């Protein structure tokens, strides 16, 4: 039986989820696209988190936490998009 694979996917999911959750709230000029910054990081984090939980791997807790944090980033992004003010 081959040895279990490393925790790389879980760590990557955790980092992407944290980036997606933190970047939209940084005090940097992101006029026009601030609400959408979380989506690429959140989607990639969820995918990597789910892949990190499948199969014989080390780092499954990191992958699960990364998937949850990335999902929270997606939720925060959806809330930010829903709260955008539409100019008349």
Image (cartoon, grey):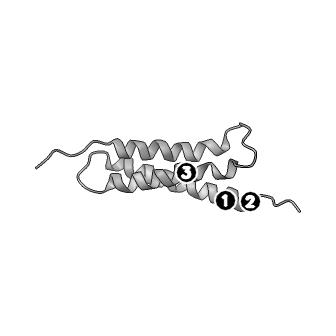
User: Residue drawn at (52%, 52%), measured in percent from left and top?
Assistant: 42
Q: Quadrant of residue 51?
A: bottom left
In the image: residue 60, left or right of residue 68? left
Residue at the far top in the pictured view: 28
Q: Which residue is mark 1?
A: 79
Measuring 40% from the left and 52% from the top, which residue is drawn there? 49
Q: Give percent across and percent down for residue 28.
A: 71, 36
Q: Residues within 10 Å of mark 1 (few under 14, many from 20)?
A: few
**Mark on residue 40?**
3
Q: Who comes first in sequence, dot 2 or dot 3? A: 3
CB under 8 Å between discs 2 and 3: no
Foreground residue among 12 and 61: 12
- For mark 2, what is the residue? 83
Q: Position of residue 13 (x, y in %)?
A: 43, 47
Q: Is residue 45 left or right of residue 80?
A: left
Q: Residues within 10 Å of mark 3 (few under 14, many from 20)?
A: some
At 33% from the left and 55% from the top, the residue drawn is: 53
Quadrant hosting residue 78: bottom right
Neighbourhood count class around disc 2 (C-alpha, 10 Å): few under 14, some 14–19, many 20 upward: few
In the rendered image, residue 71, in percent from the top left (x then y), is placed at: 51, 56
Instruction: Tell which tag, 2 or 3, sits nearer the viewer.
Output: 3
Question: Residue 72: x, y in percent?
Answer: 54, 55
Q: Dots 1 and 2: beta carbons under 8 Å?
A: yes
The one nearer the camera, 43 or 27, is 43
Q: Earlier in the sequence, mark 3 or mark 1?
A: 3
Circle 2: element type: loop
Taking the spot 67% from the left edge, 39% from the top edge, the residue there is 26
Label 3 vs label 1: CA separation?
A: 15 Å
Disc 2 versus disc 3: distance between alpha carbons? 19 Å
Q: Quadrant of residue 25?
A: top right
Q: In what element is the residue under mark 3? A: helix
Compared across the picture, whether 8 is left or right of 81 comes to: left
């Amino acid at each position: 039986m081959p040895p279990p694979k490393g925790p790389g996917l879980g760590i990557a999911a955790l980092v992407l989820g944290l980036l997606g959750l933190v970047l939209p709230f940084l005090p940097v000029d992101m006029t026009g696209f601030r609400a959408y910054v979380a989506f690429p990081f959140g989607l990639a984090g969820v995918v990597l988190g789910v892949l990190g939980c499948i199969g014989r791997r080390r780092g499954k807790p990191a992958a699960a936490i990364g998937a949850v944090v990335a999902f929270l980033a997606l939720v925060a992004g959806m809330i930010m998009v829903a709260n955008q003010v539409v100019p008349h």
